Amino acid sequence: MLVPVEGPDSPLFALEINPEKAREEFRTANQKHGGSGVKDFMDSMGLGMLAEQLGELKLGELLDTPPPGLDEAIAISKVMQFVESQEYSMFTRIVFDTAPTGHTLRLLSLPDFLDASIGKIMKLKKKITSATSALKSVFGKEETQQDASDKLEQLRERMAKVRDLFRDSETTEFVIVTIPTVMAVNESSRLRASLRKENVPVQRLIVNQVLPPSASDCKFCAMKRKDQMRALDMIQNDPELASLRLIQAPLFDLEIRGVPALKFMGDMVWR
Ligand SMILES: Nc1ncnc2c1ncn2[C@@H]1O[C@H](COP(=O)(O)OP(=O)(O)OP(=O)(O)O)[C@@H](O)[C@H]1O
């Protein structure tokens, strides 16, 4: 559910997406009208053999052990739902906080893969539907199996839109956020390379938690800062990252929590 962050008049809203729950919705729709429902129905008519053959198509299993990245796809699909809905047209900006790099990359390369997977699921579904509707027509049963197929088709259409939205530099920007360590910089470089391959627009790189120059005689701080400066140098010399607009965000001595703190930090980062 979309909730205002600061009370009723807040211009800032937040929403947590629970992919597991969304997947459950698909699974339930499938089970109700497809999977076991079909098998029971056919069993009751002495057609268990056919049901078993259909069972070998493992439709249920496809949803139980979804292809990698399906969770992210569903999350994005939910966001797309909001982008399309009139109710959400009041928003000027939608910030999508992605999962760690590996998931994000999977997500970006996913639409094509998923398109094929959904296509496969739907083909199987059609096979089952035509086999059972022949039987149903004999008994005059009108139950439809549209629900699950419709949801999959919807998911597929949304994925296509997401694919386009992510690549539209007029409306979308992918902001990479990293920290000044060698490992994080290397990871960000790989991320940028992958985003480039996928034609996703990137302009800015935020380096968070940069230690301010030490005013005191803190040896640890001086060492740490030197270490961070090395990572920052790496960014300047990295073929993937050097061309990006670099924004440094200092490490604050307090944990950034709550709207006033976030606003304070935001004002510094987005000057
Ligand atoms: N510059 C900063 N100064 C002080 N605290 C910070 C700073 N940046 C982040 N933090 C704190 O570090 C913690 C983790 O931050 P955040 O949730 O932004 O990280 P994240 O990388 O997005 O995490 P995840 O990968 O789990 O989403 C939070 O408690 C946040 O307040």
Image: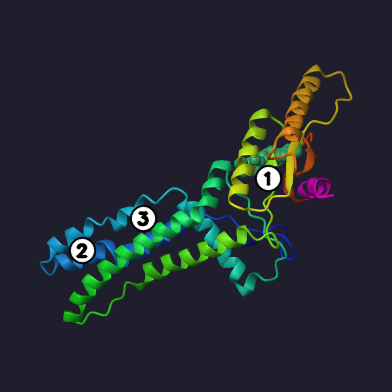
Q: Which mark is residue 144?
A: none
Q: Nearer the viewer, residue 116 or 104?
A: 116
* Residue 182 to residue 270: above or below: above
- Callout 1–callout 3 Cβ contact below 8 Å: no
Separation of residues labelled 1 and 2 (CA atoms): 49 Å
Q: Is mark 1 within 8 Å of ligand 1?
A: no
Quarter for ligand 1? top right
Which amino acid type corresponds to the residue marked 2 in the rendered image? Answer: Lys
**Where are the magenta residues, as a range?**
260-271
Res 184 seen here:
yes
Amino acid of disc 3: Leu
**Depth check, front residue: 121 or 202:** 202
Q: Secondary structure at mark 3?
A: helix
Residue neighbourhood size for the residue with mark 1, other residues' Cα within 10 Å, grouped as few (<14), some (14–19), many (≥20): some
User: Is disc 3's CB within 8 Å of ligand 1?
Assistant: no
Percent position of residue 259, x then y: 75, 51
Residue at 73% in and 34% down: 235
Nearer the observer: mark 1 or 2; the answer is: 1
Pick the residue in front: 53 or 244.
Answer: 244
- Residue 85 magenta: no
Q: Which residue is mark 2?
A: 39
Q: Is residue 69 left or right of residue 259?
A: left
Residue under pointer 1: 176
Q: Position of residue 177 (x, y in %)?
A: 69, 43
Quarter of the figure with the N terminus: bottom right
In the image as oriented, which residue stretches furthest toward the right? 215
Q: Secondary structure at mark 1?
A: strand
Identify whether 25 is placed above or below 235. Answer: below
